[in-house]
Structures are given as structure tokens and as C-alpha cells.
Image: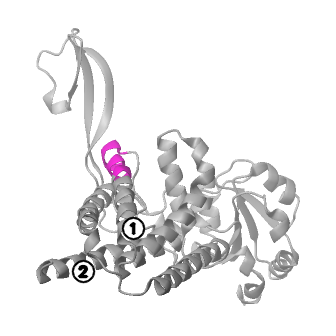
Amino acid sequence: MTTYKKNSLLIIKWIVGLLFIFSGLIKANDPLGLSYKMQEFFEAWNWYSFNDYTLSLSLVMNVFEVLAGIAVIIGWRMKLFTWLLLLLIIFFAFLTGYAVFSGKIKTCGCFGDCLPLTPTQSFTKDLFLFVLILLLFINKNQFVSAIRSSVAILLLALCVFFISGLQFYVMKHLPLLDCLPYKKGNNILKEMQPPPNAIPDSVVMVFKYRKNGKVVEYTPDKLPADLDSTYEFVDRSDKLIRQGNATPPITDFALFTLNGADTTVAVLNSTHNYVMVFVKDFENFPEWNNADFGDLQAQLQQKQIPLFIVTADKVNGETLFGNKKNITVLLCDGTVIKTAARADPTYFIMEGAYILNKISYVDLKKNISTMYK
């Protein structure tokens, strides 16, 4: 092997390895986010029965990406790992290609929410990686491991242990790096506004007519001059010409009373402090309805700070808290709750529309005294 080829393969090996390590780590910071993205793909294909397995798939995939990245960098079992990575990148390219050409998926989740890529960017990235991995696969017999096999196995075992531990930790205690629009320090009302100098989507009306058995599309400026009763109107739609960036980071946040009244603006524009407890469901209610939660209620009541239970489960919310004088139950979309609060439940310490802090229910005890001094 020439020196040039050897150095080129070394660079490629490091690029591929580091990209997979980065991808795995950034998604391991928020495995639930990847599982929700998987559900989005499955629902687009009407494979709803797979939704129950997305979290497990997410946990395994994140571990494997970091594991494979390290294995490639140290050159261990390259025949095996180049095969696996080649199959994986073909699968990823299929997903991102589907997102590009179907238009049903807005972001692919390749690097999680911390580095959102458009479907086109993700697809281009996967094609680039496919070429690099293919070169490694073709030259897989040229690599020799940089370290002994026993050391490599120990290193990879530690990797599995660390990434697995990280994922289970963040699912209980919230992500270490919060990249969502509901992160600490954000103003929800501001996040509901388009970004400064935003460019709206460019759309054009499209009319469909049937003529001589064929359906033809026309824009308003190109309607046929002989348009008459021989043209059968089929449909009118808006066609996206250029994607803009006027979509706010938060588009669907809304709070409703049990009677159905929209109270979003009233709550977020309040001049006092309050606490919102985002509860996706009440399956683990006995786990968090403990002495710490009781202490929180007592302290908030003493300081006259409102406490809101925000949930999509109206029946259980009303049954469990509807008669509590110091607690108000508000209804919110389940998808919004999953986005805002990765732990179930999550406490939002609010000042008007500002998120002063986000706390998982498992960390409530050590944060009660510092919520509002």
C-alpha cells in the first residue's frame, strides 16, 4: 500500500469514526427524542405496531453508533464493522431519501435536536458517508488494529456500559444538554414567534383540470386560453416553491381549562411566579405522588404560588386533582408534553413566560428549597 493511500484511508477512518461517535453521543443525550422520530417514520408508513419498540431500538442504536465509531478508529474487527456500517448507512440513506422525496418528514433526527438537519442535508450527509464507508469496506483487509484484542474488547465494553448508563440517567433526570425550545432560560411566548428577519414559505396556487381523460396542473398565470366546460375541475392546492424559515420554534403550545377555555395567554402573561407539572400520563403516579410532592404543595400554598398540573389525560387529571383547592388542572396536547418534558413528570419553574428551571420528578427533593426564595 502506498503512503498516499495509507494516509487517505487513515483520514477516512477517523472521519467515519468520529461522525458515528458524535452522532451516537448527541442522540444518547436524549434517546426519547430519537424514539419519537422513529415513531414519526413508522406512522408515515402506517406501522403503528412498531411504536412500542422504538425506545428499545433507540437505546441499542445509540450504543452501536458509538461502539462502531470507536472500533473503526482503533481498526478492530474491520471486516465485521465495515459490513455493519455499510448496511447501516444504506438503511439511513433510505430513510433520509424517503424524507426528501416524500416530504412527510421535516427533520430526520440524525444528530438529534441539538443539530437539526433538513432532509436534503441529511440525505447528502448519508451519501457522503456511504462513499467513505464503501472505501473502508473495499480496503478492509488493509487495516491492522492499533491495540491488542483484549484491550479493544475492554474498551468497547466500557463504551457499552458508559453509553447505556448515560441514556438511562437522562431518561430519569432530563438530558444533560437541552436543545429543545422549552429549555431553561427560554421565554415560551418569544419561542412562539417567528425568528427575526424570517422569510416566509413561497407558495403558488395550483389548479388541476381533467381534459381528454388526462389531469393537468396549471398555475393562475398559465391557465389555458381555451378554458371552458370541456375542462373538468379536479382540485386546487398550494404548492411549496421555496422553503422559508418563518416557522416558530414552538408552534402548537396551548393550555386549556377542564371546561375547554383557552388560557394560554393568561397563564404565560401572568405577573407572578408559578409551577407547571407536565404529566404525560399517570401510570407512575404512585411513584411521584410522595412526601416530596406533598412538601412542594405545602410550600407553594404557603407562598401563594399557583401550581398547575398540565396533562393530556383529562379523566385522570380531573379525578386526582380536580377537587384540590391549591392545584389547577390544565389540558395540553400529548405531543407537546412529550417534547417539553422528557421525564414524566417534569416540573417547570416559571416566571411569566420565562422558564427559570426544569426539574425531573426524581430531583424534586433537592430543588424544593431553591425553587422560589
Q: In which quarter of the image is residue 217?
A: top left
Residue identifier under label 2: 10
- Residue 195 belongs to the span the image colors magenta: no
> Please, is residue 8 above or below residue 33 in the view?
below
Query: In the drawing, what numbered circle is on residue 43?
Result: none
Q: Is residue 333 visible?
A: no
Q: Which element carries disc 1, helix, strand or loop? A: helix
Q: Which amino acid does label 1 sit on?
A: Phe
Q: Who is closer to the viewer here, 152 or 24?
A: 152
Please report whichever mark, 2 or 1, sits nearer to the chain's N-terminal start.
2
User: Residue 203: where, in percent of width, then height?
Assistant: 27, 44
Q: Who is closer to the viewer here, 333 or 112?
A: 112
Q: Who is closer to the viewer here, 313 or 8?
A: 8
Image quarter (top left, top right, bottom left or bottom right) of the C terminus: bottom right
Image quarter (top left, top right, bottom left or bottom right) of the N terminus: bottom left
> Please, is residue 154 above or below residue 179 in the view?
below
Q: Which element carries disc 2, helix, strand or loop? A: helix
State the residue at coordinates (63%, 63%). 266
Q: In which quarter of the image is residue 123?
A: bottom left
Sort mark 1 into few (<14), some (14-19) or many (20+) by Cα contacts within 10 Å: many
Residue identifier under label 1: 81
Q: How is the image coloured?
A: one colour
Q: Is residue 229 visible?
A: yes
Q: Which amino acid does label 2 sit on?
A: Leu
Q: Give the range drawn in magenta.
A: 94-103
**Inter-mark Cα distance, 2 to 1:** 16 Å
